[in-house]
Image (spheres, helix red, strand yellow):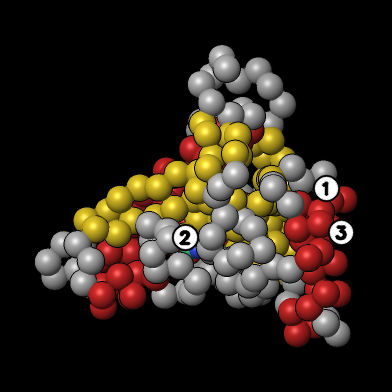
Amino acid sequence: MASRPLRLGVLVSGRGTNLQAILDAIGRGELNAEVSLVVSNKPNAPAVERARRANVPVEIYKLEDYSSRLDWQRAIVANLAGRDVELLVCAGWDKVFDREIFKRFGGRIINIHPSLLPVFGGGLHAIEDALRYGVKVTGCTVHFVTAELDAGPIIGQSAVPVLPGDNVESLAARIGKEEHRLLVEAIQLYGEGRLKIEGRVVKVLCKDA
Ligand code: GRF
């Protein structure tokens, strides 16, 4: 890969399997990127340990340590910007952003969500909701983040069948595999400058376009 690696900020709150997929893809030379900073709002999230094991910078920002949401976001933004982060990846981040983040990173934030948006968006229990509703197909979506929750322009989606006997764990495991592939692909496409947003439609440009 000839070009300079894309500088990523990765925001995590949980297990960090998507972060791991990014780190592994970089390690295998399949993703031309580097993780400049991992930010977690949960000190004990397994994702934090994954970052440490991979020797990438990781910092904890607990909302309750700040006098307001705004101060908390400003502190995170300052750190990311100081490291020249080019793309912000929400990889299991359980908080919603407002103004400050968009002012600085608007159009440069992506998120992975465990459903085929726009269905089962807007919360942290999309897999449970899909099972309870009885859909036969669900999946995952990578999308640009906008001020409207889970409603930004869609970069990619992958469908996953709901099998008889599925429970949250079994379905989440199959969705997770697709998430990891889709998220890495989306970051690589972004780094290659191949994602063009037109209104709410994301066009994926051919390699030589
Ligand atoms: C994933 O299902 C993702 O879609 C959602 O949160 C989960 C994070 O998983 N936003 P992990 O922490 O990457 O393992």
Determine whether, in the image, residue 31 is placed left or right of residue 132: right
Left or right position of 172 against 144: left
> Looking at the rendering, which quadrant does residue 22 occupy?
top right
Residue 19 in the image: x percent, y percent?
Answer: 55, 53
Q: CA distance from mark 2 to mark 3?
A: 26 Å
Above or below, comparing residue 19 to residue 92 in the picture: above
User: Mark 1 sits on what residue?
Assistant: 83
Which residue in the rendered view is the most extreme toward the top?
208
> Label 3 vs label 1: CA separation?
9 Å
Check disc 1 and give the amino acid type. Arg
Helix, strand or loop at label 2? It is strand
Which is nearer the N-term, disc 2 or disc 3?
3
Q: For the residue marked with disc 3, what is the amino acid?
A: Ala
Q: Are marks 1 and 2 in contact (CB under 8 Å)?
A: no
- Residue 153 drawn at (x, y percent): 55, 49
State the mark number for residue 78. Answer: 3
Q: Nearer the viewer, mark 1 or mark 2?
A: 2
Question: Residue at label 2?
Answer: 113
Q: Residues within 10 Å of mark 1 (few under 14, many from 20)?
A: some
> Identity of the amino acid at label 2?
His
